[in-house]
Image (spheres, rainbow, N blue to C red):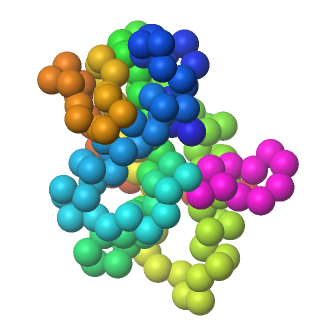
Amino acid sequence: MAGSGSSGWATGRSTRSVGAAGEAAAQAHLEAAGLRLVARNFKSPGRGGGEVDLIMREPDGTLVFVEVRQRAHAAFGGAAASVGWAKQRRVIFAARHYLQRLPALPPCRFDVVALQGTHPTVDADMSADVRIEWIRGAFDATGYS
């Protein structure tokens, strides 16, 4: 799930609903830029696996694995900085499982969509206080096995 816990999005709503709203907002942002949704919340099988929040496709065919992160404040580096090596490894693990299902490997990329500011609403209508930052090629699979 996208950003969670005590991230300052305290609105009385569940972490799951806040995460879903953030993912919907990120998806809408990417679709407005021309990407198409392929899958949402893809989980790799087994214990200790990973999850990809959004799998999108660029018009040129590039498959984009997207991690969505949310933070109310920029403390400790904000939403984008919260995608550390452990999270990257889990996303890459899930992406590899997804790619194994395909007959041919397309060009791929790992992006981060960071939502910073007051909480998004459930219908993804973002508050004027929310900043969406789309980081293309935020990390790659080099060095992860």
Q: Is residue 120 above or below residue 137?
A: above
Q: Indicate the quadrant where residue 103 lies.
A: bottom right
Q: Indicate the quadrant where residue 22 lies.
A: top left
Q: Residue furthest right?
A: 47
Q: Is residue 96 above or below residue 103?
A: above
Q: Position of residue 102 (x, y in %)?
A: 59, 82
Which of the two residues, 48 or 42, is positioned nearer the viewer here?
Answer: 42
Residue displayed at 80% across by 45% down? 48
Q: Position of residue 3 (x, y in %)?
A: 50, 29
Q: Residue furthest bottom?
A: 103
Q: Position of residue 92 (x, y in %)?
A: 61, 55
Task: Look at the image and say whether residue 37 sits in the magenta stretch.
Answer: no
Which of the two residues, 42 or 13, is positioned nearer the viewer here?
Answer: 13
Quadrant of the rendering where the C terminus is positioned = bottom right
Which of the two residues, 83 or 32, is positioned nearer the viewer here?
Answer: 32
Q: Residue furthest left?
A: 128
Q: Is residue 139 visible?
A: no
Q: Is residue 47 above or below residue 133?
A: below
**Magenta residues: mostly which secondary structure?**
loop
Residue displayed at 49% across by 63% down? 39
Residue displayed at 47% across by 79% down? 106
Q: Which residues are magenta?
A: 42-51
Q: Is residue 23 visible?
A: yes
Residue displayed at 51% across by 49% down? 53
Apparent side of residue 44 relative to residue 91 in the rendered image (left or right)? right
